[in-house]
């Protein structure tokens, strides 16, 4: 199928420094680069399908990590400890924002906005469905979406041969750090 979009993602472990916007060490666990299984009707749907596949990889790695740390953990059991927090007006004070259990970092601003929106865009119903699945998976992980410009995204090198920004990937591979 010509016309199918190329997508790629990286899964790794890091420290709370990444959530704080500082340069953080990253241990790469998994990466993937491939064509979408089908053509998508919009760029948001392409990004949402890719985000959904990336979340599946993240859930797989999170379940493996939890199974190694917690005796008796089984797939489908909670992946985070539910800690009740006092409500706050400033989201920067929330523990989920200061030190989330997981982050999905993307360069797709439309997907990022859709994940943070309480009401999905009904112009592309399939993309809205994929966004709600990603949001549900992020809640399962205690995770947050994050946005970076595409010229700072290391996974950009996994999505195209010509015109890719390879410098962020080279920096990640050489230094094992990302911000």
Image: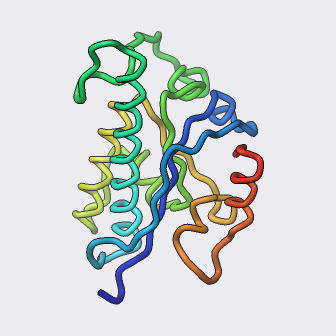
Q: Residue 138: horizontal and vertical position, in percent?
A: 38, 37
Identify which residue is drawn at 33% across, 12% down.
71
Q: Where does the C terminus fall, quadrant-wise? A: top right
Residue 126 rendering spot, x and y as whole percentages: 23, 63
Residue 153, position in %: x, y?
A: 63, 59
Which quadrant would residue 135 be assigned to in this image? Answer: top left
Question: Which of the pair 74/131 is nearer the observer?
Answer: 74
Residue furthest out toward the bottom: 2
Query: Is residue 179 shown above or below 152?
Result: above
Judge left or right: residue 172 versus residue 64: right
Taking depth in this image into account, of 135 and 78 the one nearest to the observer is: 78
119 to the left or right of 108: left
Query: Image point 52% across, 52% down: which residue?
Result: 10
Q: Quadrant of residue 26?
A: top right
Residue 145, horizontal then vertical, whole percent: 49, 43
Q: Classify residue 90 by image quadrant.
A: top right
Q: Nearer the viewer, residue 48 or 86?
A: 48
Determine the residue positioned at 31% across, 59% down: 121
Which residue sits at x=37%, y=31%?
64
């Amino acid at each position: 199928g010509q016309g199918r979009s190329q997508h790629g993602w990286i899964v790794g472990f890091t420290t709370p420094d990444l959530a704080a916007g500082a340069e953080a060490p990253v241990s790469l666990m998994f990466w993937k680069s491939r064509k979408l299984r089908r053509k998508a009707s919009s760029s948001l749907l392409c990004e949402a399908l890719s985000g959904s596949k990336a979340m599946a990889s993240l859930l797989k790695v999170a379940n493996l990590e939890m199974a190694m740390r917690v005796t008796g953990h089984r797939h489908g059991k909670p992946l985070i400890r539910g800690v009740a927090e006092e409500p706050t007006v400033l989201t920067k004070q929330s523990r989920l924002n200061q030190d989330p259990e997981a982050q999905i970092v993307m360069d797709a601003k439309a997907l990022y906005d859709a994940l943070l929106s309480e009401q999905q865009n009904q112009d592309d119903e399939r993309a809205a469905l994929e966004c709600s699945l990603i949001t549900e998976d992020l809640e399962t992980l205690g995770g947050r979406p994050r946005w970076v410009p595409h010229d700072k995204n290391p996974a950009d090198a996994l999505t195209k041969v010509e015109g890719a920004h390879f410098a962020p990937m080279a920096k990640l591979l050489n230094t094992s750090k990302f911000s």
